[in-house]
Image (cartoon, rainbow, N blue to C red):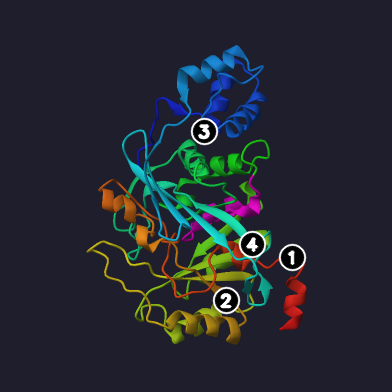
Amino acid sequence: MVKKRQLSPQSVWDVDAVRLAFEAIGANPKHIPRLYNHMIRNPGGGWADLPDFPKAARAALDAGFVLHTTRLLTVQRSSDGETTKLLVQLQDGLQVEAVVMQYDNTGGWVDGWVAAMEGGKRTTLCVSSEVGCAMGCTFCATGTMGLSADLTAGEIVEQLVHASSVSRIQNIVFMGMGEPLNNYEAVRTAVRLMTDPSSFALRRRKVTVSTVGVIPRMLQMADDMPGVSLALSLHAPTQELRQTIYLERTGQRVFVEYVMLGPDINCTQAHAHQLGRLLQGRNVLVNLIPWNPILSPSITFAAPEEGATAAFHSILRYQYGVNCTIRAEKGQDISGACGQLVLEHGGAAGGGGGACGSKSGGGLADLEDLLPPPRTQAAAVAAR
């Protein structure tokens, strides 16, 4: 457990902090949705010019809140223009990363399903929830650093605010630095604001929270964040309980992230058969993520050998009927894996499961590519 951070001033994007401030002065909380709607529609503006805003509420915000507690240090764009990595500095000097990834699968297909569910073009933001990570995954840039701090809800939302200046964001994945379910309250508060129809208005199914399997919080998430997608980082073909418990509680399909570690740590054909037997018949969607080389002397893993990922995919998909795709390469030329950019800048860092910018030998790119269009799913299944 890391020490709780107290920001001063606080982020106006921390909705719970704003609500407490309003309650302390007797201001009606009904003005809070108007506040966020105004700021989102007027980027860079604040609450000073918000019409019919109570003077007491304005004074409370002036006294204890700012539009941004974070600042954008660097913006790195990949050579193909599809990936933009943001290095964000927090109020106390710590640093985190967020990654904007643009996808265009118009006319593409996923195992017989049309990938272009809503026009084929979309932009996904990968956000961080902690500085560092306590989970200790040895193949992850952040896993070697330990946990430095939990982000506040406002600091999480500010990543979306910064990213919105780069592109219009349609999807959010909590796959950046940290284990989101270990910073549960802040993540829950941030997700609620992101999906609030009066603020950012993202669809719940467009928000995905990734976890290595914090079971009590997975159960709580089912109640607190209904409709939000869960991605389970299952990097070995074992530990069945982690992937079944959420299914039983919600009935929702679960994404399974599987980082392929070569040459034969977890990506041989024997491993594929083990994973296939584990997941066969379950309502899951597997995303194979070939390991992204990390610029750190303490991490000695290797990417899978050529053809290994395709063979692994083929076994899962065609021998066991497990819906599966391969994560496409994004941003490797800008140190796309989570934690790399902070490592290069020498800041306190931490990265999640390496989902951002993972190296791949091809295939499709995004978690949404794993979801069949509802209108065509039955027809696709019947056609197999």
Badge 4 is on which residue?
Answer: 120
Instruction: Say few, some or many: other residues with alpha carbon within 10 Å of mark 2 (under 14 / 14 to 19 / 20 or more).
Output: many
Q: Which mark is residue 374?
A: 1
Circle 4 crowding by C-alpha within 10 Å: few under 14, some 14–19, many from 20: some
Q: Nearer the viewer, mark 1 or mark 2?
A: 1
Residue at the image position 28 percent from the left and 46 percent from the top: 347
**Identity of the residue furthest to the top in this view:** 55
Please provide the residue range marked out in magenta: 202-222
**Distance (Cα) linking label 1 and label 2:** 22 Å
Q: Which mark is residue 14?
A: 3
Q: Earlier in the sequence, mark 1 or mark 2?
A: 2
In reply to whether residue 212 is colored magenta, the answer given is yes
Q: Secondary structure at mark 1?
A: loop
**Dot 1 and dot 3 residues touching (CB under 8 Å):** no
Q: Position of residue 327 (x, y in %)?
A: 49, 69
Q: Badge 1: how crowded within 10 Å, few (<14), some, or many (20+)? A: few
Residue located beneath label 2 in the image: 279
Asked whether residue 228 appears in the rendered view, the answer is no
Report the residue at 57% width, 48% height from top: 169
| Apparent side of residue 258 relative to residue 381 in the rendered image (left or right) | left
Q: Nearer the viewer, mark 2 or mark 4?
A: 4
Question: Does label 1 or label 3 sit earlier along the sequence?
Answer: 3
Q: Give the Cα separation between the discs numbered 4 and 1.
A: 15 Å
Q: Position of residue 61 (x, y in %)?
A: 52, 20
